[in-house]
Image: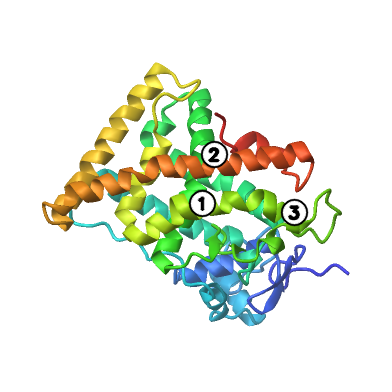
Amino acid sequence: MTFNCQVCNSKSSGIHFGASVCRACSAFFRRSVSRNQEYSCKRNGDCKIDTERRIMCKKCRFAKCQKIGMKKDSVQKHRDIYGKRLPVFRPISLPTPFLNRIGGMYKKLELDRIAVYESYEPPRYVNYKQNIEILLREFYLISDWIYNSFIGYAALPTDQKDVLIRHFYFQFLNLESGFRSSQRRRNDVWFLPSGDFIDCVNLESFFHDPDEVQPISSEEAVRLFSPSFESYHRNVSIPMITDHVDFMEFLALVTLILFPTGLEGQSDDCMKISRQIRETVQKEIIQYFKNTKNSEDAPIRLGNILSMLPNLERSSRRFTEDIELRRVLKAFPVDVDFYEKCLMKF
């Protein structure tokens, strides 16, 4: 049986925040509550809300959300199972304009994620199919975020953007998950951008497919592919937890993995821009260390942070190789779009 959204009468996607609504109205309600929005109405609160006119008056739309029983206190409570999202970024009063800008844009990315992924709540353990679905959706979010955040990237030709993002995306997923592990002091789950997670203690559940018979069992898959997760812990999450990587350091690492030099297919102009941006962010992180660390600790800290870059690439390469192997074995197949867009090429 098909149900309609109680707010705008379009097709409902399920129960969200206590009412049967569509994804658009659910996302609107989440944004309104999480941002504590206040709206006004030009018609004294008497606007008709339907599929065609739901965006015309936000005040009446939000009022109707509440009238049908959508609950404000449901917006965040499910997301607290494994801790809230990362703390809100507040620009520091240091001469680090580049990193401050990226931090502000990362905050906007997190708000976009809240709107996009709310249909998955409450947070859940995911299997490989659900994981690929999330990461493919995330690819488009990250592509937009990079374009809007890094002026140097936006100015590049399309083919050079492709070279950089193919090298960047999977490393960014690993880095961000490691940073979340560092912030929450947890190494038993892999945190996903949606707020969901992979159970690293029970990987059989990750490789379990309830819908299709696979050529290898979930137990055999763990034997073959668990080294990827072990490599991630050894090279990424454990070092980041040990070193208590903070937000500014995370932003510096994000920038450095987005703008490498010497990639196959990378043009001379692209490498020139990459070098300029790398120099800028390294100067800013050095300045940050000078203002937050003592003079003896600053160079050691810088060395520790930069040493994470080859480890991060090593871990990402291992995951990519395993996904390639699964494709060859025709086991735990990867969506063609994910394979074509998201995987690193060496």
Amino acid found under the numbered disc labelled 2? Arg
- Real-space Cα separation, disc 2 to disc 3, in angstroms: 21 Å
**Visible residue check, residue 143:** no
Q: Is 269 positioned to the left or the right of 52 in the image? A: left
What numbered label is drawn on residue 53? none
State whether residue 323 is above or below residue 242: above
Contact, mark 1 vs mark 2 (Cβ under 8 Å): no
State whether residue 77 is above or below residue 105: below
**Visible residue check, residue 341:** yes
- Residue that numbered label 1 is attached to: 232
Q: Secondary structure at mark 1?
A: helix
- Residue that numbered label 3 is attached to: 220
For image coordinates 42% across by 68% down, the residue present is: 185
Position in image of residue 168 (x %, y %): 48, 38
Q: Quadrant of the N terminus?
A: bottom right
Amino acid found under the numbered disc labelled 1? Tyr
Q: Which of marks 1 and 3 precedes in the sequence?
A: 3
Q: Of discs 3 and 1, which sits in the foreground?
A: 3
Q: Is 122 positioned to the left or the right of 283 in the image? A: right
Q: Which of marks 2 and 1 precedes in the sequence?
A: 1
Position in image of residue 162 (x %, y %): 53, 29
For image coordinates 35% across by 60% down, the residue present is: 242
Residue 61 image-quadrant placement: bottom right
- Residue that numbered label 2 is attached to: 317
Report how many numbered discs are placed on residues in the image.
3
Contact, mark 3 vs mark 1 (Cβ under 8 Å): no
Q: Quadrant of the C terminus?
A: top right
- Real-space Cα separation, disc 1 to disc 2, in angstroms: 10 Å
Pick the front one: 74 or 318:
318
